[in-house]
Image: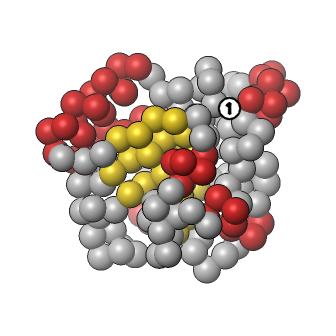
Amino acid sequence: QEHYGGLQGLTMAWIGDGNNVLHSFMMSAAKLGMHLRIATPRGFEPDLRITKITEQNSKEYGTKLLLTRDPLEAADSANVLVTDTWISMGQEEEKKERLKAFQGYQVTMQTAKSAASNWTFLHCLPRKPEEVDDEVFYSPQSLVFQEAENRKWTI
């Protein structure tokens, strides 16, 4: 909202794990007038109960929801590209399996080519290079440090 001046009509693309951070976006995006495009690997989808609520919210608020396995499809025309850690605390023993499952999900400039011309990138940190490459992470489109500062004031 700070960057775009408002959220109504923006499209957010989530590329990665169907985790708690995604669930928060799913529960709020439609209510804020945002379209949501989600790409997760098989077996790492968001919670089905949250997905059902998100589908209902999208209908109620007139927004679009896409669930796919294709990161480029999710990124298509998106204003905001978002990812998060693929290996959360307590999942360290799953690292090898998770890295294999998430191959092809790294956010890169190739991913951003299909995004909207005014695209930005978010990651709630800490970030691992396999999730997003340096070119995107340190690009002028990356808002990760502003995001971290904003979060600081809410903690």
Which residue is at the front of the view, 119 or 25?
Answer: 119
Determine the secondary structure under disc 1.
Answer: loop
Q: Is residue 145 visible?
A: no
Left or right: 128 with respect to 77?
Answer: right
Name which residue lies at 69% across and 66% down: 109
Residue 84: x and y in percent read: 60, 46
Name which residue lies at 43% across and 55% down: 12
Q: Is residue 62 visible?
A: yes
Left or right: 58 with respect to 15?
Answer: left
Q: Residue furthest bottom?
A: 140
Left or right: 10 with respect to 40?
Answer: left
Q: Which residue is mark 1?
A: 89
Looking at the rendered structure, the number of numbered marks drawn on it comes to 1
Q: Tag 1: residue type?
A: Met
Residue 134: x and y in percent read: 77, 66
Which residue is at the front of the view, 50 or 78?
Answer: 78
Image-quadrant location for residue 24: top left
Say if 27 sits above or below 95 in the image. Answer: below
Badge 1 local density, few (<14 within 10 Å), some, or many (20+)?
Answer: few
Say if 120 sits above or below 102 in the image. Answer: below
Name which residue lies at 24% across and 62% down: 8
Say if 150 sits above or below 20 in the image. Answer: below
Name which residue lies at 36% across and 74% down: 4
Residue 80: x and y in percent read: 47, 61
